[in-house]
Amino acid sequence: MSALLAVIRRDLLLVMRRKSEVLTILFFFVIVTSLFPLGIGADTALLRKIAPGVIWVTALLSTMLGLQRLFASDFADGTLEQMALSPTPLTLLVGGKIAAHWLVCGLPLVLLAPVIGLQFDLDASTLGTFILALLIGTPILSLIGAIGAALTLGVRGGGVLLSLLVLPLYIPVLIFGAGAVYAQSVGLDVGGHFSVLAALLVLALFFAPWATTAAVRIAIE
Amino acid sequence: MSSTIGKNGNQFIHWFKFSSPATFYPLAGKLIPFFWALAIIFGIAGLWISFFVAPVDAVQGQGYRIIFIHVPASWMSMFIYIVMAVWAGLGLVFNTRLSAMMAQALAPTGALMAFISLWTGAFWGKPMWGAWWVWDARLTSELILLFLYLGFMALQASIDDPRRADKAGAILALVGVVNVPIIYFSVKWWNTLHQGASISVDKAPSMAHTMLLGMLLMALCLWMYSIAVALMRVRAIILERESHADWVRSLEGVK
C-alpha cells in the first residue's frame, strides 16, 4: 500500500514540477467545449441538448491526450524496467500510475465540468448528475486508456494509433455517461445509466491494471 | 498417417504435431482446396435457395433477400473476432508462434465481414427504414467491431518485432472481445429501431423454414470461405516469418 502511495506521490510531484503539460490538457478541454457554441450558434435550447455529448466527447479526447505521457518518460529513462524488477507487484505500481493519471487528467475535468455546463445553460440538478457521471466515468477512461498507452509504448506513430485503439473502447462510457445527463435534463430516471457506469467501473478496476501490466511487460521485455 | 498416432499406442492423433509452422504449412496447403470446394457448394446451394426457393416476404417484398448475405456476414464478423481472440489468447498463454499467426491471418477476413455486414445493412435500410444509416445499437456495435479489427491490424502493423506485435495484439484482442457480448445483448439493452432477433435458441424461428435454410447455408458458405482464406493468409505469414528456416528454403515454390 505504501508503494502505491509512493508511486502516486511521485507522479503528482513530477506533474507539479512541470505544470504546463497538464494545464495544456485542461485548456484543451475548455477551448474545445467553447468552440461548439461558436460553431453551432447560441440557441440555448439546442446547446442544452448537445451539452452532455459535447462535454463528454471532449472529456474523452482530453483524457486521451494525457495518456501519452502516462508511461512514455518512464519507459524512455528505464524507470519502468526498475519498477518491473522491484519486489513490489508491478500491477500495484501500474495501478498507482493510473490513479495519478486520473487525479491529474480526470479529476480536474470533473471540477471544470460545472463551469463548462453553465456555458451550455444547464440547470443545477443536471449539473449535479453531470459531476456524478464524470466522477464515475473518468476513472474508467484512465483505466482503459492505460492499456492502450502501454500497448503503444515506443511504437511508430504511437499517438494516432493510441486513439484508434482506445476510442472504440470508450464508447460505452460515452453512451451511458452522456445518457445519464440527458435523462436527467429531460426528467427521466437516471438509475439505470449509473448502474451500468458503475458496473463498467468495477469491470475496468478489476481487469485494466492487470491487462496494462501484461502490456507493460511486453513493451520492456 | 501412421506417424501421427502416439508412440505409446493410444488412438488419439497427436494434434500438437501441427502446432509447428513447418508441419502446419503443408497441412494447410492440403486443406485449402477442400474448404474452397465446401464454400462453393454451400454458396451455390444457399444462393439458389435464397433467390429461387425462399418465398417473397409479405411485408418487405423482394428486398428482404439481402439478409441472406447480411445476417451470415454479421454472424461471421462476431464469430471470427471470438476465434481470433481465442487464438491470440492461446498464443499469449502457451507462447506458440502459430496461434498468433492464425489470429493475424483472421483479422482482415473479420474486418471484411464486418464491412459487408454494414454495407449490405445500409442497402437494406434504405428501402425498409428509408435511411442508409440509423444510430441503432446493433449497427453501432457492428461499427465498433470494425474499428476494433482495424485497431488490431494497425497495432500489429506498426510494431516491427513480430513477437511483440503478436503479444500486444493478443492483449488488444482479449480486451476487445468484451465488445462482442455487448453487440449481442445490445438489442435487449437499447430498445430501438432495429427489429429484434428472428432466430433464437429458446424459441422456434419466426421465419419460413426455407428462409432459415438459405441463411444457414450462406453462413456455412461464408464460414468455409473464411477458413480457406485464413489458411491461405497464414501460409503467406508462415513463409514470411520463417524465411530464415531451412525447411522454407527447401520448398519447391520458394527456391
Image (cartoon, rainbow, N blue to C red):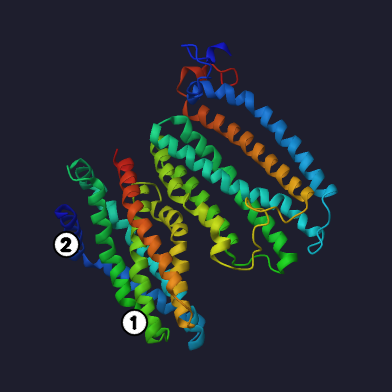
Residue at figure coordinates x 60%, y 32% from the top left: B232
For residue B192, above or below residue A113:
above
Number of marks present in the image shown: 2
In the picture, which quadrant includes the N terminus of chain B?
top right
Q: Is residue B137 above or below residue B37?
A: below
**Residue A54 visible here:** no
Residue at image mark 1: A115
At a point 48% along the width and 47% down the height, the residue shown is B152
In the image: residue B128, left or right of residue B235: right
Tag 2: Cα neighbours inside 10 Å, few (<14), some, or many (≥20)? Answer: few
Which chain contains the residue that carries disc 2? A
Amino acid beneath label 2: Leu
Q: Which mark is residue A13?
A: 2
Q: Quick check: can you spot residue A176?
A: yes
- Identify the element where label 1 is drawn: helix
As drawn, is A106 to the left or to the right of A50?
A: left
| Vertical position of residue A110 compared to residue B171: above or below | below
Where is residue A87, by image quadrant?
top left
Q: Do marks 2 and 1 both belong to one polypeptide chain?
A: yes
Measured along the vertical axis of the image, is residue A99 above or below residue B237?
below
